[in-house]
Image: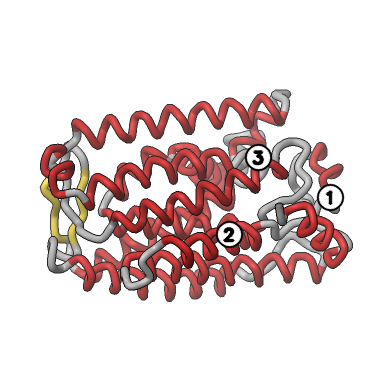
Amino acid sequence: MLFPKTIRYLAKIQLGGQPIREDGPKSHIKKSGTPTMGGLLIIASIMLSSLIWVDLANMYILVAIFVTLSMGVLGFIDDYKKIKYKNSKGVSAKWKLVWQVSTTICAAIAIILLTQDSLEGAMIFIPFICPNGIDIGIFLYLIFAFFVITGSCNAVNLTDGLDGLVTVPIISTTACLAVISYITSNVLFSDYLKIQYIPGTEELFIYCGSIIGASIAFLWYNANPAKVFMGDVGSLALGGALGVMALIMRQEFIFGIAGAVFVLEAVSVIIQVVYYKRTKKRFFKMAPIHHHFEQMGYSENLIVVRFWILSFISCAVAIMVLRIGY
C-alpha cells in the first residue's frame, strides 16, 4: 500500500536516481534514473511487524534487529553518497570493513553469551564432518562470524544486479531459516533430527516471516521492469539479517547451501579478481556471474527465473542435508 507513494517520493528527491556502473552491461544504461533505496520501506515493514508480533524481551530478536539496522544504516550512507555525488562508488571499502567488523564483533559476543547455557558458546556444527560440534575458541569464532555476516551482506549485495533477481532467493532462503528456527527451538523436533536445541529461537520464525512479507511486497514493484531498486540499504540489511540468524541457530553451513545463489555470485567475483590479477585476463565475460550470462546473450528475465529455480532447489537440498547430516 505504501510503495507507490514511496516510489514517487524517492523519484522526486533523488532526481538522477540509481547510478549505473560504468563498467556494467550497456543494456543497463536504460535503468539509469530508476529510484533506489526502496530497502528503507523493506526495513520499516520488518521493524513494524516485529514491534507488533515478536517478544521484544527475547535477546535473539534484539541481536537480529541490531545487525539488520546497523547494516541498513551503512547501506543508507552508501546509497546517499552515490546519489549525492552521482557515481557508483559510495562508502570506501575501508570504512565498510570497519563498520562490518564492529557490528559482527558485537553480535558474535552477544550470541556466545546468550547460547552458553544450551551449548558451548564458540561451537560450530558441520553436517557429516562434525555434527556434534567443535569448540573453535572465541577468537576463531569471531573471525568465523565475520565471514558469515559480512559474507552474507556482500553476497546479497552482489546478487542485486538484475530486476527481481535477489528478492526471491531472499524469500526462499529466509523461509528455509524459518523452518530451522522452529526446529531448533523445539526439544522434540531437535532431538528427533539430532540437531542442537536452542530455546528461544522460535521468535526468529516471526522475524523471518516479517522479512518474507516485506520482500514479497517489494517484489511487486521490483519485478522486471523494476520501478524501484532496494539499494545497498536493503541488500546489506537483509544480508546481515540472514547471516546473524544463521549464526544464532548455529546452522551457518546449512545457510550456505540454502543461499547457494548468493555464494555463487560472491565466488564468481572472487574468481574473476584473483584470475585477473594473476593472468591479466578475465575468467568470466563479466562478474558477478549473472552479468556473464547477460554477455552470453541470455535475456534478463531468463537469467532471473533460472536463478530463482536454483534458489528453490538449493533450499530443498539444505533441508535434506539438515535431515541426514547430523
CA separation in Å, label 1 and label 3:
16 Å
Residue shown at the point (31%, 68%) measured from the top left:
58
The numbered dot on residue 32 is 1
Left or right position of 90 against 208: right
Q: Amino acid at mark 1?
A: Ser
Dot 2 and dot 1 residues touching (CB under 8 Å): no
CA separation in Å, label 2 and label 3:
18 Å
CA separation in Å, label 2 and label 1:
26 Å
Label 2 environment density (alpha carbons within 10 Å; few <14, some 14–19, many ≥20): some
Dot 2 and dot 3 residues touching (CB under 8 Å): no
**Which secondary structure, mark 1?**
loop
Residue 279 vs 74, above or below: the answer is above
Circle nearer the N terminus (2, 3): 2
Left or right position of 254 against 116: right
Residue shown at the point (20%, 57%) measured from the top left:
198
**Which secondary structure, mark 2?**
helix
Q: Which residue is mark 3?
A: 164
Left or right position of 239 against 90: left
The numbered dot on residue 138 is none
Q: Which residue is mark 2?
A: 45
Residue 131 appears in view: no
Residue shown at the point (65%, 39%) measured from the top left:
164
- Please identify, in this view, whether the residue under mark 1 or under mark 3 is nearer the observer: 3
Circle nearer the N terminus (2, 1): 1
- Please identify, in this view, whether the residue under mark 2 or under mark 3 is nearer the observer: 2
Q: Amino acid at mark 2?
A: Ser
- Please identify, in this view, whether the residue under mark 2 or under mark 1 is nearer the observer: 2
Residue 299: where, in percent of width, then height?
Answer: 72, 25
